[in-house]
Amino acid sequence: MTDSSAHPSGPVVVTGANGLVGSRVCRALAARGLTVRAVVRRAGTAPSVPGVLEWVGEFHDPEVAAAVTDGAGAVVSTVHPMGSDLDTQRRIGVEGTRTLARAAREAGVGRFVHVSTAAVYDRSPGVGAVTEAGVVAGDDGGDYPVTKRDTDQAIAEVDGLTAVLLRPPAILGAAESSVWNVLRPAAFRDDEQARHAVADGTFAWVHVDDLTALAADLADGTVIASSDPGRGPVEGRATPVNVAAGSAGERATQRDYYETLGRALGLAPVWDDAPAWTGHIAADRARAWGWSPSVDLRAALAEIEHGLRA
């Protein structure tokens, strides 16, 4: 098995290379001098920077998965068809990622980094700090959390693959496809129902630049492996790691986010009186691996407000 604590011996494969996270991972790895195989569905959509080689195809096609992982040193998987019907999320998100993970194992890829989500956890009212050992969402948890949960499990079942399951909450950051900087604000503007929230409910978040930094550190071997998941990814296993800004004492709330949208768009949020999760996503494991977020809440919200006003 390839030593995942070493610098990748071959190119790094990035799926969803034209997306919010994938495009930034491509640029970050290229800036470190690595060659990137940027997998996209449409030609001409991968980042056009030196070191990034566009690879057009469906990552979930077994032939494409085998070809793109051949000789690769690492894989960063960022694709999930969020918002699609359940069958599509299962076919592409769950089964497709399983296909890619198996191809990576057969190719001897040293590390498989998958962008999952903190939505896989039960975050019901009354749940406090959510750690990697937290209870996952049940089958009634909604299409997206359940299929992401099942994708994580599918990767974990690929024997011998050293995988890292990155679990971010809301990913903030400027891009046309950004859910929290663009799509949710558009809904807030256009639909009164989208302005409803519980003011004191937790708004768990991370900035895309900080998520990208950890993904790149994992892919290029900066974060070395360990037999203890508290110190690093475990060889031959799937290791989950939460990637969230803030802490129990720095908890952002729904009020913080929705009032930002309201100021920028000239509309008032509607506060509901209902139970809500008021805990936090504990990212102690990521910090023990050497990760530290650089974008604070004030800067992240200011970026959203500036973008909406512009």
Image (tube, rainbow, N blue to C red):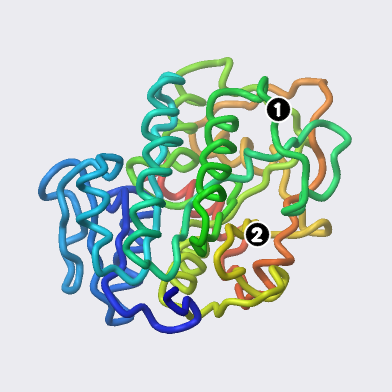
The picture places residue 153, in percent across and down from the top left corner, at: 58, 43
Q: Quadrant of the N terminus?
A: bottom left
Q: Is residue 69 visible?
A: yes
Residue situated furthest right in the rendering:
126
For the residue pair 297 and 170, the one nearer the viewer reads as 170
Mark 2 crowd level (few <14, some 14–19, many ≥20, 10 Å Cα): many
Height in image: 88 above or below 305? Answer: above
Give the Cα distance between marks 2 and 1.
25 Å
Q: Quadrant of the C terminus?
A: top left
Height in image: 11 above or below 64? Answer: below
Q: Which residue is mark 1?
A: 138
Q: Quadrant of residue 203?
A: top right
Which of discs 2 and 1 lies nearer the camera? The answer is 1
For the residue pair 91 and 177, the one nearer the viewer reads as 91
Using residue 273 as the reference point, say whether residue 286 is left or right of it.
left
Q: Residue at x 20, y 67 (%)?
A: 52
**Residue 245, which numbered label?**
2
SS label for mark 1: loop
Q: Quadrant of residue 70?
A: bottom left
In the rendered picture of this protein, how many numbered marks are placed on residues?
2
Q: Residue at x 40, y 52 (%)?
A: 77
**Residue 6, which numbered label?**
none
Q: Residue at x 23, y 62 (%)?
A: 37
Which of the two discs, 2 and 1, labels the residue nearer the N terminus?
Answer: 1
Q: Amino acid at mark 1?
A: Gly
Q: Is residue 297 visible?
A: no
Q: Amino acid at mark 2?
A: Ala
Height in image: 201 above or below 212? Answer: above
The picture places residue 305, in percent across and down from the top left corner, at: 49, 46
Residue situated furthest left in the rendering:
43
